[in-house]
Image (cartoon, rainbow, N blue to C red):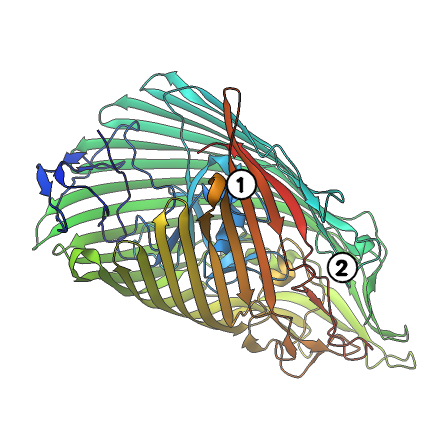
C-alpha cells in the first residue's frame, strides 16, 4: 500500500511528515534512474527516521512516474542552480490572465510583464533568455523572441533557471525557461476544459474564451503512448482611456501531439509536433496610439522534434535530440498614411510592414556517465549542439512626422524603398559538465561550454561552477551559490541590419523653416562585434521550519557586456550598430511558503531589484514591432525596473469544500522618460517618474460538484477586485497640458472556473 508520494528538493532530499508509527519501505524512482527500494525501517512515535538511497543512471519505462501537484518555491530537478518551478496544475486553480505557460511565469518572484506585455525574467531583455522543451530550443532565431505557445493542458511544469551551472544549457545571458510536457497514459481518456468564457465587468461582453480538448491513451498498452492537446484562444484587452474602449484581440489555435514509445527495457523514443497559428489585431494600441495607427501581427508555422534515449549500460546513457521549426511572421497595416506623433495622440498608419520566413534545424547529442570515484559520486555529461537557421524577409517603411502641440511640423523621417533580407547561420556548441556529490551534504556542479556565434563569427567560452551544502541536519538548511559566464545567441536580424531601409531626417522650426539640411542615415555595423554575455553570481539559503514552513532567501547579481545597441551619428551620417552596451542587475528575494495540506498552501514573496542598462537596445528598433524614433543612447534604469514587488498566491480551503485561490500583487510602477516637442528626451531617461504602483487582487472560488456520474470542479474567477487601478500609460510630453497624468487602468472582469475534478 502506498501511503505518500513526493518529489525531492533541489538537494535530492525529501521529508514525509505525519507518518504513523510502523515499518516502511521507500521506493525512489525517476525517469533516467534505476528504481531503488530501501531496506525495511521502523518509524517510532515522536522520532525521525533517516533513510539514504543511491540511484544509478539508466532508463526507467514511462509507466513509473513520481510527480508533485504543487512544487515548493525551491523545488527543481537542478541540485545546485537557482531556479523556480511551477506545476501546470496551477492553471486549473489560479486566476491567470491567460490560459498558457507564459501566464504562469509572472507568478514567480523575478518575472514581470513590461509595458508592451512582454516577459522580463530576472531583469533581462525579452530576447536575452532561452526557451526549451527537453534540449530543443523554441526561440525564434531571427529575433530572439518567445514566439511560440502550447495548449495549457499539454504543459506539466514550467521551470525558470536564473543561471544554470550545467553547461548543457546555452545561448542565453539571463535565464532558461524549461517546459516539461504531459505524455499519454495507459488508459484512454478524453478531457474537455475551459468551456465557459470570461466576461468584461459584470457580464458586459466576452473578455476571453479559451476552450481546450485533450485525448490521451495507449496505441499499444505499456509500449506506445499517444497524447493530443488542442486549444482555441480568443482574448481581448480593452484600452479604457480611448473613446469606445476599443480592444486588442488575440486569436490562436494551438495544437500539441506527442507520441512515446518503449522500444526495449533500455531504449525509448519520443516525439512531438506543435502547431501555433496566431493573430493579434491592433497590437501596440494604447492611450496615445489609437486603433487606426496599430498594425496586425500574424504568425503561422510548426515545430517538430524527437528524443531518443538509449542505455548502453546501467551507468551510461546516450541521448539524441532532433528538432525542426518553420514559421512565418507578418506585421502589416491597411492604413498607409504617414505616421504622425503629436503630444496628445498619434494618427495616420503604422509606419512599417515586414514579413519573415524562418527555418531552423537543431541536433543535440549527449552522453551521460555516472561513476563512483575521486571521493564521491559523479554524473558526467558531454555533448554537442548544432543548430542551422535562416530567414528570408521583406520590409517597407513609410514616412513618420513629429508635430508640435499647435500642429506645426517639427521633424520628418523618410525611409528608402522596400528592402529584402536573407541571413543564414550555423551555430555549434560543445559542452562538458560534472555533477559531483562529494558527501551526503555537499554537491558541486562544474561546467564548461564552447559556442560558435554564426552571425559575428566568434567562438565564446562559458565556464561555470556552483555548490550546494546542507548545513543543517535532514536537509533543513541548504546553502547554494555559484558563479558563471553565460553567452547569449545573436539573432539573425542583427546580421540583416545593413539591408534595412536607410532614412533621411529633416527638422523644422516653429515658423516652418528647416533647421539645417536633411541628414541621411545609412545602416552600419561595427566590424568588431562581440557576442553579448553576462557574468552572474548568486547565493541562496533554503530552510525548513518544522514540517510546514519553508523559507528561501537569495541574492543574484548580473553584469552584462557586449549588448547590441543603436547609436545615431548625424556627423557621420550613420545609424551605428555596436556591441558596446552594458547592463547591471541586482536582486534580493525572500520567499516563504506554508504547507498545511493540499487545500492550505500559501506562498508569499518579496523582491527588491534594480536594473540599469544602455537603453538603445537593438531589439526595440528592429524586433517584431519597430520604433521609428532613435535618439542618443544613455545608460540608466531599464524601462521595466521594479524596485519593490510583493506577491501572494496559493489555496485556502473553506467550509463546504470551497477552495479560495488568491493572487495578490503589490509592486512599484515602471519608470518613464519625459520628451519635448521633437520627441527628444528631457533630462535623464527613465528618471522623470514612475507609473502608479500596481495593486491588484485576483482570485478564484471553486468546489467539486457531481451531476449523475460526472464529477467536475466549478466556480468563479474574479480579476482585479480593486477596480480601476494600475494605469499602464503616462502622458510624457512636457508640452501637453496633461503632462504627468496616468491613463488606461486595468479593468475588473469575471470568469468561470470549470474543469475536471481533482
Q: Residue furthest bottom?
A: 683
Residue 702 is labelled as 1
Position of the C terminus by quadrant: top left
In the image: residue 440, left or right of residue 248:
left
Residue 148 visible at all: no
Q: How far across and how far down the image is residue 152, in percent? A: 52, 38
Q: Residue furthest right?
A: 511
Marks 2 and 1 sit apart, C-alpha to C-alpha, by 58 Å
Residue at the disc numbered 2: 416
In the image: residue 211, left or right of residue 153:
right
What is the secondary structure assignment of the residue under circle 1? strand
Residue appearing at x 75%, y 72% in the figure: 731
Q: Nearer the viewer, residue 172 or 107?
A: 107
**Upstream in the sequence, badge 2 or badge 1?**
2
Residue 165 visible at all: yes
Q: Nearer the viewer, residue 346 or 305?
A: 346
Q: How far across and how far down the image is residue 737, in percent? A: 83, 77
Position of the N terminus by quadrant: top left
In the image: residue 363, left or right of residue 423:
left
Q: Is residue 235 above or below residue 226?
A: below
Q: Nearer the viewer, residue 176 or 448?
A: 176
Q: Nearer the viewer, residue 244 or 583?
A: 244
Q: How far across and how far down the image is residue 273, in percent? A: 49, 31
Please rate how many residues cluster around mark 1, counting C-alpha atoms within 10 Å: few if below 14, some from 14 to 19, many from 20: many
Q: How far across and how far down the image is residue 389, in percent? A: 50, 44
Q: Is residue 590 above or below residue 70?
A: below
Q: Is residue 29 above or below residue 12?
A: above
What is the secondary structure assignment of the residue under circle 2? loop
Amino acid at each position: 500500500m502506498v501511503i505518500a508520494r513526493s518529489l525531492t528538493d533541489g538537494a535530492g532530499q525529501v521529508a514525509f511528515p505525519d507518518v504513523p508509527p510502523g515499518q516502511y519501505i521507500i521506493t525512489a524512482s525517476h525517469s533516467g534512474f534505476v528504481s531503488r527500494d530501501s531496506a525495511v525501517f521502523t518509524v517510532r512515535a515522536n522520532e525521525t527516521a533517516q533513510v539514504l538511497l543511491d540511484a544509478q543512471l539508466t532508463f526507467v519505462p514511462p509507466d513509473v512516474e513520481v510527480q508533485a501537484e504543487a512544487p515548493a518555491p525551491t523545488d527543481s530537478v537542478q541540485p545546485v542552480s537557482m531556479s523556480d518551478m511551477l506545476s501546470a496544475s496551477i492553471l486549473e486553480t489560479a486566476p491567470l490572465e491567460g490560459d498558457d505557460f507564459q501566464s504562469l511565469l509572472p507568478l514567480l518572484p523575478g518575472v514581470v510583464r513590461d509595458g508592451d506585455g512582454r516577459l522580463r525574467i530576472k531583469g533581462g531583455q525579452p530576447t536575452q533568455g532561452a526557451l526549451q522543451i527537453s534540449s530543443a530550443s523554441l526561440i525564434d532565431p531571427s529575433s530572439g523572441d518567445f514566439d511560440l505557445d502550447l495548449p495549457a493542458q499539454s504543459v506539466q511544469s514550467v521551470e525558470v533557471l536564473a543561471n544554470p551551472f550545467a553547461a548543457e544549457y546555452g545561448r542565453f545571458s539571463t535565464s532558461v525557461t524549461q517546459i516539461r510536457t504531459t505524455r499519454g497514459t495507459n488508459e484512454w481518456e478524453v478531457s474537455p476544459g475551459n468551456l465557459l468564457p470570461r466576461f468584461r465587468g459584470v457580464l458586459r461582453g466576452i473578455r476571453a474564451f479559451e476552450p481546450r480538448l485533450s485525448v490521451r491513451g495507449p496505441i499499444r498498452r505499456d509500449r506506445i503512448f499517444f497524447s493530443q492537446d488542442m486549444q482555441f484562444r480568443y482574448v481581448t484587452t480593452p484600452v479604457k482611456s480611448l473613446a469606445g474602449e476599443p480592444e486588442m484581440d488575440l486569436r490562436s489555435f494551438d495544437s500539441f501531439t506527442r507520441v512515446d514509445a518503449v522500444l526495449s527495457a533500455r531504449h525509448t523514443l519520443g516525439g512531438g509536433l506543435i502547431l501555433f497559428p496566431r493573430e493579434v489585431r491592433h497590437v501596440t494600441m494604447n492611450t496615445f496610439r489609437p486603433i487606426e495607427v496599430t498594425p496586425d501581427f500574424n504568425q503561422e508555422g510548426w515545430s517538430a522534434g524527437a528524443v531518443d534515449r538509449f542505455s548502453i549500460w546501467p551507468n551510461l546513457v546516450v541521448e539524441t535530440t532532433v528538432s525542426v521549426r518553420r514559421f512565418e511572421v507578418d506585421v502589416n497595416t491597411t492604413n498607409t498614411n504617414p505616421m504622425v506623433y503629436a503630444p496628445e495622440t498619434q494618427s495616420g498608419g503604422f509606419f512599417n510592414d515586414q514579413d519573415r520566413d524562418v527555418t531552423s534545424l537543431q541536433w543535440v547529442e549527449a552522453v551521460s556517465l555516472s561513476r563512483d570515484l575521486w571521493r564521491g559520486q559523479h554524473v558526467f555529461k558531454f555533448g554537442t549542439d548544432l543548430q542551422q537557421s535562416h530567414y528570408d524577409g521583406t520590409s517597407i517603411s513609410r514616412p513618420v512626422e513629429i508635430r508640435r502641440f499647435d500642429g506645426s511640423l517639427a521633424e520628418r523621417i523618410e525611409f528608402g524603398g522596400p528592402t529584402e533580407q536573407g541571413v543564414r547561420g550555423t551555430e555549434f556548441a560543445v559542452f562538458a559538465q560534472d555533477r559531483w556529490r562529494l558527501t551526503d551534504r555537499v554537491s558541486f556542479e562544474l561546467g564548461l561550454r564552447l559556442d560558435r556565434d554564426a552571425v559575428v563569427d566568434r567562438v565564446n567560452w562559458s565556464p561555470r561552477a556552483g555548490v550546494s551544502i546542507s548545513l543543517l541536519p535532514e536537509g533543513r538548511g541548504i546553502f547554494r551559490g555559484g558563479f558563471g559566464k553565460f553567452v547569449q545567441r545573436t539573432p539573425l536580424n542583427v546580421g540583416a541590419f545593413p539591408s534595412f531601409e536607410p532614412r533621411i531626417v529633416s527638422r523644422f522650426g516653429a515658423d516652418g523653416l528647416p533647421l539645417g539640411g536633411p541628414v541621411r542615415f545609412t545602416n552600419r555595423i561595427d566590424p568588431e562585434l562581440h557576442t553579448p554575455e553576462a557574468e552572474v553570481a548568486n547565493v541562496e539559503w533554503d530552510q525548513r521550519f518544522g514540517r510546514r514552513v519553508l523559507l528561501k532567501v537569495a541574492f543574484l547579481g548580473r553584469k552584462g557586456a557586449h549588448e547590441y545597441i543603436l547609436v545615431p551619428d548625424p556627423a557621420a551620417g550613420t545609424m551605428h550598430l555596436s556591441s558596446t552596451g552594458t547592463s547591471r542587475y541586482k536582486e534580493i528575494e525572500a520567499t516563504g511558503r506554508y504547507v498545511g495540506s493540499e487545500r492550505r498552501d500559501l506562498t508569499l514573496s518579496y523582491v527588491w531589484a534594480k536594473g540599469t542598462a544602455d537603453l538603445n537596445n537593438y531589439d526595440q528598433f528592429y524586433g517584431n514591432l519597430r520604433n521609428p524614433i532613435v535618439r542618443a543612447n544613455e545608460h540608466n534604469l531599464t524601462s521595466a525596473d521594479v524596485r519593490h514587488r510583493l506577491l501572494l498566491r496559493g489555496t485556502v480551503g473553506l467550509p463546504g469544500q470551497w477552495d479560495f485561490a488568491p493572487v495578490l500583487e503589490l509592486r512599484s510602477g515602471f519608470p518613464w522618460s519625459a520628451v519635448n516637442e521633437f520627441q527628444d528626451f528631457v533630462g535623464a531617461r527613465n528618471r522623470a517618474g514612475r507609473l502608479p504602483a500596481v495593486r491588484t487582487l485576483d482570485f478564484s472560488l471553486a468546489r467539486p460538484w457531481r451531476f449523475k456520474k460526472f464529477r467536475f470542479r466549478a466556480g468563479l474567477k474574479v480579476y482585479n477586485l480593486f477596480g480601476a487601478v494600475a494605469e499602464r500609460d503616462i502622458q510624457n510630453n512636457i508640452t501637453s497640458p496633461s503632462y504627468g497624468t496616468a491613463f488606461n487602468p486595468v479593468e475588473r472582469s469575471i470568469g468561470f472556473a470549470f474543469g475536471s475534478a481533482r
